[in-house]
Image (tube, rainbow, N blue to C red):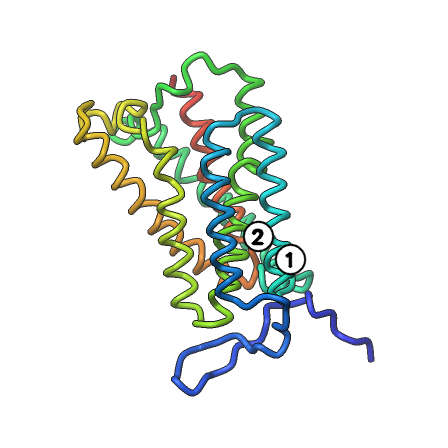
């Protein structure tokens, strides 16, 4: 009978003495402990957030791929495997099916929202003015999957989720991952209130309005992080939140481009 590859499935979950779910630590024997690894991951993400917010083009894509590899390296250094990041080979097929279904669902919702007069303004965005067809294709097929989805999913639903889940269980993993995911979006939200007409009408163009828009974006993306973590938990694969994340961003670009 062939031996089982340790990366084929999610790590086993056992009940600890306090009654909380915790990942079996038998396979977690690395040079550094879990919490030092978490601190290191957060430090890398702080630096990455600042750099990726400033860099564009190929430099941003290379940096995003490098950060993703570095974070997976930290997980491995702490004794984890690809399965702990939701990338075990045994769960990829199931995760892929989840991803395709979620992408189709988002596509239907976006199409309906863009066609209905009552919700059409929610998809309008001044940042898409002057964007050409090639620019749109590059963003949907390259920038979003590599510069956004890859790095964010590996960071928050992959490495961070896997590390915290190891010590504290799924509730703590979801909480920590989602909180940091919300804070990750502070910089991208700095000009959100003035970029989207629907938000400008709500928050205005004042400093207070900008702050409220940023806080709302952090809360909204934090809540989205909870959903992504739940998809990771239910599917056992990082591909499920990756598919939803890509669809929300990519179809948003398409809708905004068509409604310029």
In the picture, the disc for residue 92 is: 1
Question: Which residue shows up at 54% across the image and 30% down it?
Answer: 140
Q: Position of residue 228 (x, y in %)?
A: 44, 53
What is the secondary structure assignment of the residue under circle 1? helix
Q: Position of residue 78 (x, y in %)?
A: 60, 64
Query: 10 Å neighbourhood of mark 2: few (<14), some, or many (≥20)?
Result: many
Q: Position of residue 127 (x, y in %)?
A: 39, 20
Does residue 49 sit above or below 232 in this rendering?
above
Does residue 27 sit above or below 91 in this rendering?
below
The one nearer the camera, 211 or 1, is 211
Is residue 1 left or right of 150 when viewed as pictured?
A: right
The one nearer the camera, 126 or 187, is 187
Question: Which residue shows up at 64% across the image and 57% down it?
Answer: 92
Question: Which residue shows up at 22% across the image and 34% down it?
Answer: 211
What is the secondary structure assignment of the residue under circle 2? helix
Is residue 173 left or right of 85 when viewed as pictured?
A: left
Q: Identify the residue position indicated by label 2 in the image.
A: 239
Q: Which quarter of the rendered picture does the N terminus lie within? A: bottom right
Q: Position of residue 95 (x, y in %)?
A: 58, 56
State the CA–CA distance, disc 1 to disc 2: 7 Å
The one nearer the camera, 5 or 250, is 5
Labels 1 & 2 near each other (Cβ < 8 A): yes
Q: Which quarter of the rendered picture does the C terminus lie within? A: top left
- Residue 52 shows in the view: yes
- Say which label, 1 or 2, has the lower sequence index: 1
Question: Which residue shows up at 36% across the image and 29% down it?
Answer: 114
């Amino acid at each position: 009978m062939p031996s089982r590859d340790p990366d084929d499935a999610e790590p086993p979950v056992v009940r600890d003495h306090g009654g909380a779910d915790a990942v079996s630590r038998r396979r977690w024997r690395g040079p550094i402990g879990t919490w030092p690894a978490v601190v290191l991951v957060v430090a890398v993400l702080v630096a990455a957030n600042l750099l990726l917010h400033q860099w564009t083009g190929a430099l941003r894509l290379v940096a995003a791929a490098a950060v993703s590899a570095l974070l997976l390296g930290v997980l491995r250094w702490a004794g984890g495997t690809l399965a702990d990041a939701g990338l075990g080979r045994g769960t990829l097929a199931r995760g892929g099916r989840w991803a395709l279904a979620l992408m189709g669902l988002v596509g239907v919702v976006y199409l309906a929202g863009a066609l209905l007069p009552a919700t059409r303004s929610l998809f309008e965005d001044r940042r898409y003015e002057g964007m050409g067809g090639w620019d749109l294709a590059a963003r949907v097929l390259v920038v979003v999957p590599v510069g956004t989805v890859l790095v964010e999913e590996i960071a928050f639903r992959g490495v961070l989720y896997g590390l915290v889940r190891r010590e504290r269980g799924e509730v703590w993993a979801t909480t920590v991952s989602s909180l940091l995911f919300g804070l990750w979006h502070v910089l991208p939200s700095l000009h959100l209130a003035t970029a989207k007409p629907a938000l400008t009408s709500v928050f205005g163009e004042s400093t207070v309005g900008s702050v409220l828009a940023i806080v709302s974006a952090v809360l909204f993306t934090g809540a989205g992080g909870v959903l992504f973590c739940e998809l990771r938990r239910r599917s056992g694969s990082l591909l499920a939140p990756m598919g939803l994340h890509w669809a929300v961003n990519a179809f948003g670009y398409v809708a905004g481009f068509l409604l310029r």
